[in-house]
Amino acid sequence: MNFPLVTAQDWRAQVDKELAGAPFDKVLVYRTPEGLAIAPLYTERPAAGPVHAPGHFRICVKVDADAPAQAIGDEIKGGAEALWLDATSAEAALAAGVPDLGETPLVLRCEGEAPLATLERRASRLPPDAVFALSVDPFAELACGRIAPAAIAQARADLVQSARFAQARWPRASIAAASTLPYHDAGADAADEIAIALATGAAYLEWLVDGGLAPAAAGRLVMLRAAAGRDTFGEICKLRALRHTWRKVLIAAGAGEVEQPLLHAVCSSRTMAQRDPWVNMLRTTAQAFAAILGGANLVTPTAFDEALGPASPLGRRVARNTCLVLREESALGWVQDAAGGSYYFESVTDALAREAWKRFQALERDGGIEEALANGTLRAKLDAAWTDWLSRITTRKAPMLGVSDFPNLDEKLPQPPHQDAAQAGSGLPVRRDAQPFEDLRLRAEANGARPEAILVTLGPLAESRARVGFAINFFGAGGIRTRETTTDERAVIACLCGSDDRYAAEAVARAKALKAAGCTRVLLAGRPGALEAALREAGVDGFVFAGCDAVAVLSELLGAFR
């Protein structure tokens, strides 16, 4: 069978015909939070060429500081191939003789003691070919408010001492970590995360080189850690762009074509929800998928019930098994650079890398990561990025299944939900996407009688279905139950639901009748258009529609139930 040759110009001409005058850039081009334009079709590879990603990855499970040795052993038995844990926990587990721990790559946190002391204590236990990462990251500690700016000078000296001690003993070890997790949790977008990782890593490279290490040796001692967030394709490109730009930093530092650094991807805690937490399994699956295709060497999945409190054994098991299924049944990790060769991935990776590099250069011009953290400019930038993202959440343009969309008001949670505690200290805020809607749910449940709104349907049943479905989800996101009716009843909230033609014919009269029946708030589902003045005069208090600020509207409505 022969197919006619169709060019990109032919395709565009047909698309413009179908759009019938609607602007192509508005209808079919999507803008990311970073400002990148995502086109509907890619027909060429970018001039920069492909970014190759490794195929194999290890499942790296995060272990709580107070976890007993038995729990650490259970993680290894359950499929964990690497462990991210406190150094003292690792010592206790080794002393307890946990099977296979000596052969398991470890990512160590050395909180509460100098990193050199941790290394010296482990020197006799670790063979020269041991694979481990100490993940010293004083800038992340500063960002979290755990150390003061004045402590950076001592942290620099500690890092250099640790690196020099480790370099001669464990050539496969990493000592410093350039982590984006605190910044991601505070609201950073993908380009900011990459720029901050580069600025952090560049600072550690400078410290190590100034401390007497060769640039190539210093480059091998720095690992990268990044969050894998909700935008699956975007996160694949983010991790690929991070690896690509870090290679540029190493070359600029004189390290040459060194071996690719250890890249540790951690499924995002910011995206985890307390409500309908079972959906978190899907979020973790998508994020782990992105981490693997993005080229992460270590992938840390998140337990589905983490946002409710300490992860349960079931939550940890499901998290591990998610990565095992992705590798063993979906064959991810066995394919070299699975995303490579896609013009879409290559183009977006290139665009994101260029945008991140601009932001990295701006950070460096202004004094680097240390200055940005000390003078508050980075905090202000992240606050602005979060405000931007929050507007997408509250208007439900960035929907959250089970929270802002399709909430389950009859769910049985594994643990009681709670309001996130207010943060003290000078550290960056820790934010969660679901919190604005979850706070509304808590307010609704605090009422003695659960809030209810009546949905007053106009016309035949088929005419009102679309807006009834919208209204059920809209009110449910704030914990307000709904009940359909065709009569004018007394209620705290009544919402008219029907077609545009039915609104033009009946909405004004029905709004007056509902107010006369004693309804406190009368709303209409949909945009009012030219009817707005008449509807407001008839007693309609507001309009609920796709794109309105759902959190603000629902918060005001909950106040009516006092």
Image: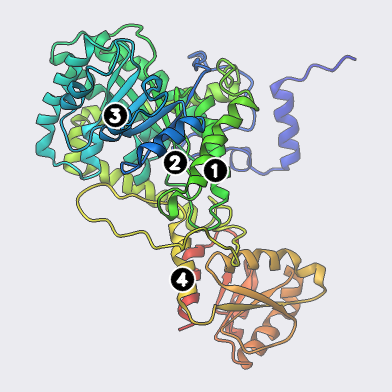
**Few, some or many C-alpha atoms within 10 Å of disc 3 (few <14, some 14-19, many ≥20)?**
few
Q: Whole-Å distance between the Cαs marked 1 and 3?
A: 37 Å
Which of the two labelled residues, at mark 3 and mark 2, occupies the earlier sequence position?
Answer: 3
* SS state under label 4: helix
Residue 332 percent across, percent down from the top left: 59, 24
**Few, some or many C-alpha atoms within 10 Å of disc 4 (few <14, some 14-19, many ≥20)?**
some
Q: Do the residues labelled 4 and 2 touch (CB within 8 Å)?
A: no
Q: Mark 2 points at which residue?
A: 268
Q: Mark 3 points at which residue?
A: 95
Residue kind at label 1, given as amino acid type = Arg
Q: Whole-Å distance between the Cαs marked 1 and 2?
A: 9 Å
Which mark is in front, 3 or 2? Answer: 3
Which mark is in front, 3 or 4? Answer: 3
Q: Name the residue under label 1.
A: 283
Which of the two labelled residues, at mark 1 and mark 4, occupies the earlier sequence position?
Answer: 1
Which of the two labelled residues, at mark 1 and mark 3, occupies the earlier sequence position?
Answer: 3
Residue 144 percent across, percent down from the top left: 25, 43
Which of the two labelled residues, at mark 1 and mark 2, occupies the earlier sequence position?
Answer: 2
Residue 181 percent across, percent down from the top left: 35, 38
Q: Is residue 141 visible in this depiction of the protein?
A: yes
Q: Mark 4 points at which residue?
A: 555
